[in-house]
Image: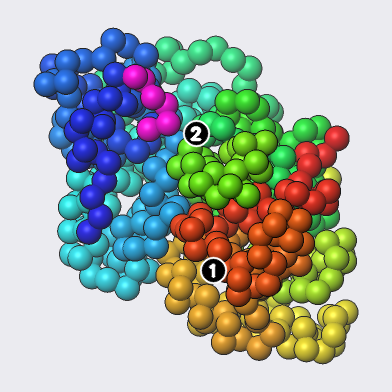
Amino acid sequence: MQTGMHTDTERCVRAVQSKDARFDGWFFTAVLTTRIYCRPSCPVVPPKPENMTFHPSAAACQQAGFRACKRCRPDTSPGSPEWNQRADLTARAMRLIADGVVDREGVPGLAARLGYSTRQVERQLLAELGAGPLALARAQRAQTARLLIETTPLPMAEVAFAAGFSSIRTFNDTVREVYALAPTELRARAPKRPLAGTAPGALSLRLPFRVPLNPDNLFGHLAATAVPGVEEWQDGAYRRTLRLPYGHGIVALTPTPDHIACRLTLSDLRDLTVAISRCRRLLDLDADPAAIDDQLRADALLAPLVDKAPGRRVPRTVDEAEFAVRAVLGQQVSTAAARTHAARLVTAHGDAVDDPEGGLTHLFPSATALAATDPETLAMPRTRRTTFTTLVAHLADGSLNLGVECDWAETRARLLALPGFGPWTADVIAMRALGDPDAFLPTDLGIRRAAGELGLPSTPAALTARAAAWRPWRAYAVQYLWATDNHPINFLPV
């Protein structure tokens, strides 16, 4: 079991006294005299150290009888970066909880996906996070409810249902307990702002992150590789369709200096929590850029790249199976050719959606739909056709799982066992779909070219040896190395 930052009292006290926003989401401060819990950067006068206790999660604070601060709103902190940089049981469980699995399948469903007993999962989460899966999911429901209360005109009964509560009474009791206000009082106190729009299910929200965040390669990559009909860049925003558990959605994500503006249109509001979680994963918003950049700066040849444009994130995905398919389509072809191949599949096999505000037309085809395609209709070399059909067959029958709960090393080994999957394809899927922060691409031509120009070793074996000092952040080193090229993936579209 790992020990969280909340156990280092001296360090936590220093962070609170300096109101250091870098630690928001890493731990929460509970004040014994007021029975309120806060984020480290809370703007109020810090309490005396002897009146502070520290907890690893908002759920743990709530379990201990503390309510959320009305000033700093700790529920709007970025998520803990630990769950994106670790692949152990706790981290995998937290990714599944964020994806709404407990609400949809209960704790037994969570445990089954992880391959452990319910008791083992509950014991591990309680030991490390101070709260079990039900309490963690309850805290997430409360946060979703607050978002809907403050940003939509929905009746409270619909808010309760959309946030995942089983009854109006449970919804009311939870909101009062967590925020010390009734739902109607929360709405009355919310800042007045224009409603998100007239489209059914539409709402606008802010996605927080730890600064700095460099949007160039993040949004540049997503825009440059966008599949027509599924993704587009429009008016300074990356827009795309989302396949979700209860329906579908369309999201528009716009970078701003201190948050990502997110506009969501959902066919079923019960998908709100999942949609937010997937958008945060897509943009790598829970990363800790200070820790990442500090380690990469220790290499004298990487340091100038980091200093020039700190805060690079790894552009990821909202659908792991979709990305794996697109990685195969992009093998040994240009970005434009890969987009063309993907667009053909989308037109032929994707589910149609309406987009009154733009040019999105389809959801990316499901693995089941792609597995039913006639291989002879695929305009690609026979060997790649075999790679494609084998991949979608394994995804469709469940023998290959790329979900947020998967073990990175085991899944990479499974990918390498498939025909046509070499280290580059497996590692790019590990980096961008599975979210492994240490995935590395030493055979990538762009990486080798950048390494040669910087004076780093350019052969895969020698570069891998040099990159050992960059661990566990080699996926971020890839972003800095790629950014030395003038490829469109490295620039925000004009």
- Measured as percent of width and height from the top left, residue 128 is found at 22, 51
Q: Kindly identify the amino acid type of the residue bearing the numbered disc 1.
A: Ala
User: Which residue is identified by label 2?
Assistant: 210
State which quadrant residue 452 falls in: bottom right
Residue 254: image tag: none
**Residue sitting nearer the eye, 307 or 301:** 301
- Measured as percent of width and height from the top left, residue 317 is found at 62, 55
* Residue segment shown in magenta: 18-23
**Residue sitting nearer the eye, 456 or 98:** 456
State which quadrant residue 362 falls in: bottom right
Residue 341 drawn above or below residue 374? above
Question: Split into 4 quadrants, where in the image is the N terminus?
Answer: bottom left
Q: In percent of the image, x 46 and y 15: which residue is there?
A: 190
Residue 29 in view here: no
Residue 465: image tag: 1
Left or right: 59, with 325 as reference point: left
Question: Split into 4 quadrants, where in the image is the C terminus?
Answer: top right
Quick one: SS at disc 2? loop
Q: Kindly identify the amino acid type of the residue bearing the numbered disc 2.
A: Arg
Is 335 included in the stretch rendered in magenta?
A: no
Quick one: SS at disc 1? helix
Q: Earlier in the sequence, mark 2 or mark 1?
A: 2
Left or right: 170, with 433 as reference point: left
Left or right: 20, with 429 as reference point: left
Residue 484 in view here: yes
Q: In percent of the image, x 61 and y 86: which residue is there?
A: 418
